[in-house]
Amino acid sequence: MASPVNPPRGMRDFLPVDKGRRERALATIKRVYAQHGFDEIETPVVEDIARLHSGLGGDNEKLAYSVLRRGITREDLADAAEADDALRLADLGLRYDLTVPLARFYASHRAELPGVFRSLQTGPVWRAERPQKGRYRQFVQCDIDVLGEAGPLAELELLTATNAALAALGLTGTTVRINDRRILSRLLASWGIPGHFGERALITIDKLDKVGVDGVVEELRALGVDTAGIADSLRGIQSAGWELEAAAPAWLDLDAYRELLMLRDALPGVPLAFDPTLVRGMGYYTGTIFEITHPDSGSSVAGGGRYDGMIGRFLGTEVPAVGFSIGFERILDLLPDEAASPGDSVALVHDKDVPPARLLQLKQEALAGHERVRLERRPRNLAGLLDTLTAAGYTAFALVGPDTTEPAYRPLG
């Protein structure tokens, strides 16, 4: 028996029906983002290995795929083994997100870009994940970013455009959870957690939804943190909302909170929920952070935040930046079927003795009035063919014989 021939683990092939559905959803997202003034760019799928491992990518750097240098010698292998550093054998790596490539792109082309640059970038990224439902080693990201705008207008534009893109896809029932890294810093300080524990403590808090309050406290204790009072504090914080301004608790950074209130008030059509336990795992975030959740998804379907310090690492000059990324693979699983339907598609099912030139003429005529036209030879099992066409999204068909002049279309499905 022949062995199964499958794609690499954690990666997928897409049949025409699935590929078409993906492309239509992606086109909708890009169309809405373009309407909101974002300009599409493209960057290489590989970047210099040193850039991908410069500390900008957080935990994703551990999941990066590396590309071996050409012409590696025995001496190179021995040197890497002695140093216990396999990265010495690589000079490039596959991108694990679109944010690091965007930062490099902006540093490369700043003189050619407007003072405030609204970027749109989509494409595949690669991470050496442990494959599971909704988590793959190759997947598509859809990012919009605003570079050069230090004020809240950047966040407002990102939230408005992303909410509009999801609405255009037909996705309803979403909630935007929002927080600020400054609030998290104040929270850690109120618990007396030393600064050198900061990022590790935040990673632990980020697991709250999965391990609960007791699990978070236990992990903090294992780090060496004095956890007295943290459990009660966390339980109280979980119920915090938009009513804290009048009597601000000790853990709240009031200036950051007021900025979040301003965002809420400026976005009456967007369901914003304040969540002081929202962390976002990337260490490069410096201010506002946000995630979009949906009741039918166990994970967030979009997320982002402000990362003012990243581009300065390339330029030596600080550039304010905020980004938002749609989890494209998760979104697809939530969309209603009609949201990504191919539109008006018809098939000309012809007898085998119809001259090819006549078939081509009929197809050209049909293309004038329909979005998509396919020629199919009539099989003995017509019902099976019609089922296949229906599954592929075709809406009507016509039988074509040698004497057909005006195809008579019949609905499918």
Image (cartoon, rainbow, N blue to C red):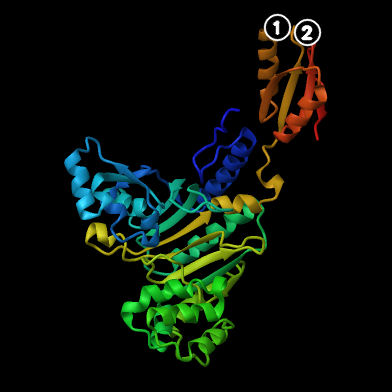
Task: Residue 11: tell me if it is visible.
Answer: yes
Mark 2 neighbour class, 10 Å CA radius: few under 14, some 14 to 19, many 20 or more: few
Give whichever of discs 2 and 1 has the lower sequence position.
1
Residue type beneath disc 1: Pro
Please tell me how crowded label 1 is: few (under 14), some (14-19), or many (20+) other residues with Cα within 10 Å: few
Report the amino acid beneath label 2.
Pro
Q: Regarding mark 1 in the picture, which secondary structure is present there?
A: loop
The reply to whether the C-beta atoms of the residues labelled 2 and 1 are less than 8 Å apart is yes
Which residue is label 2 attached to? 402
Residue 408 in the image, given as x and y percentages of width and height:
82, 21
Question: Foreground residue, 93 or 349?
Answer: 93
Residue 264, horizontal then vertical, whole percent: 55, 73
Q: Relative to residue 201, is residue 389 drawn left or right? A: right
> Along the horizontal axis of the image, is 103 left or right of 381?
left
- Residue 38 position, x and y percent, is 46, 51
Q: Which mark is residue 49?
A: none
Query: Is the residue 368 above or below the residue 289 in the image?
Result: above
Q: Residue at x 36, y 65 (%)?
A: 284
Would residue 245 be visible to someone looking at this image? no
Expressed as whole percent of the image width and height from the top left, the position of residue 92 reads 29, 44
Q: CA distance from mark 2 to mark 1?
A: 7 Å
Instruction: Name the one closer to the observer, 112 or 21.
Output: 21
Identify the image quadrant of the C terminus: top right
Residue shown at the point (25%, 53%) measured from the top left? 85
Quarter of the figure with residue 250: bottom left
305 is higher (above) or lower (below) than 386: below
- Asked whether 238 or 177 is in front, the reply is 238
**Does residue 139 sit above or below 396 in this rendering?**
below
Please state, as top left, top right, bottom left or bottom right, where the N terminus lies in the image: top right
Disc count in the image? Answer: 2
Residue topped by disc 1: 355
Q: Is residue 413 left or right of residue 143?
A: right
